[in-house]
Amino acid sequence: MSELRIIGITGIPEIMPGDNLAEILLQALLRQKIVLEEKDILVVKQKIVSKAEGRLVWLKDVIPSEFARYIAVQTGKDPRHIEVILRETKRIVKMDRGILIVETKQGFVCANAGVDESNIAGEEVVSLLPLDSDASAQRIRDYLIQKTGIPLAVIISDTFGRPWRQGLVDVALGVCGLKPIQNYKGQRDPYGHLLKATEIAVADELASAAELVLGKTTGVPAALIKGYPYVLENGKGTDLIRPAERDLFR
């Protein structure tokens, strides 16, 4: 691979619950005169996927539990917001210094169960993660292939923190059409050393690369990656979740 191209998809309107997101993305590509090609990779921000799937909660409708009120005092957050987080949580991993790290019902370990109020129109509205980001990616991919005949891959991305590093990066929540991990175990490096533990999270790398084009305040919630060599095959975002027995941070 000598060149990688990432194109932000512009002109996407405010997404509403029930919208056909795949068709909206396709029309935006056509207006921008972007030609889909075999093995392109479409990266779509989780927020517009959640909007289209109706994964929105109005805080005015939320009655916080006593436990939510207790955590709200510890964290300094709105107890209604905490209640929504708890409803999306399988297990609280860590609560300290106003930060709530949980394992979501989908299996992700992240801050606030992915419940977020940024980039949403209206007052006191929060978005939830898709119920199944892999299924979301597959629906978008299937629709685009049906309409265009072009085999491609789709990644649903979101912003996560990292235990060992400052700052946030985008990661792949949902994947369809490519293997999310490149396994180099058993291969040798240029100096002949046998690689024993090298697995590269390529879907996360692609999601983060797309974020350089998307940003947080540009209103560009999707990008198309061209030039990355991969094999069209089945893969899931959940393959990137580290098993509990190997996760030192659980």
Image: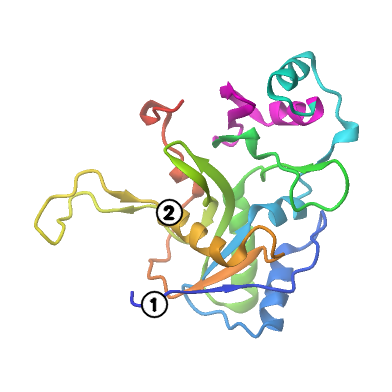
Residue at image mark 2? 180
Q: Quadrant of residue 227?
A: bottom left
- Residue beneath disc 1: 3
- In the rendered view, would you say 29 is above or below 153? below
* Viewer-nearest residue: 131 or 113: 113
Magenta segment range?
79-107
Count all numbered tags in the image, as a single digit.
2
| Identity of the residue drawn at 59% across and 64% down | 141
Whether residue 91 appears in magenta in the rendering, the answer is yes
Residue 80 badge: none
Please name the amino acid that badge 1 sits on.
Glu
Callout 1: SS: loop
Q: Quadrant of residue 117?
A: top right
Amino acid type at image mark 2: Pro
Q: Is residue 2 magenta?
A: no
Picture quarter with the N terminus: bottom left
90 relative to 133, above or below: above
State the residue at coordinates (86%, 24%).
63
Q: Residue 228, how many percent across, how many down?
A: 41, 70
Q: Nearer the viewer, residue 162 or 154?
A: 162
State the image coordinates of residue 25 (x, y, percent, origin top left).
69, 70
* Residue drawn at (66%, 77%) of the image: 29
Residue at the spot 59% in from the left edge and 57% down from the top edge: 137
Does any portion of residue 191 appear in the rendered image? Answer: yes
Categorize mark 2 by other alpha carbons within 10 Å: few (<14), some (14-19), many (20+). many
Residue 217 picture location, percent across and down = 69, 60
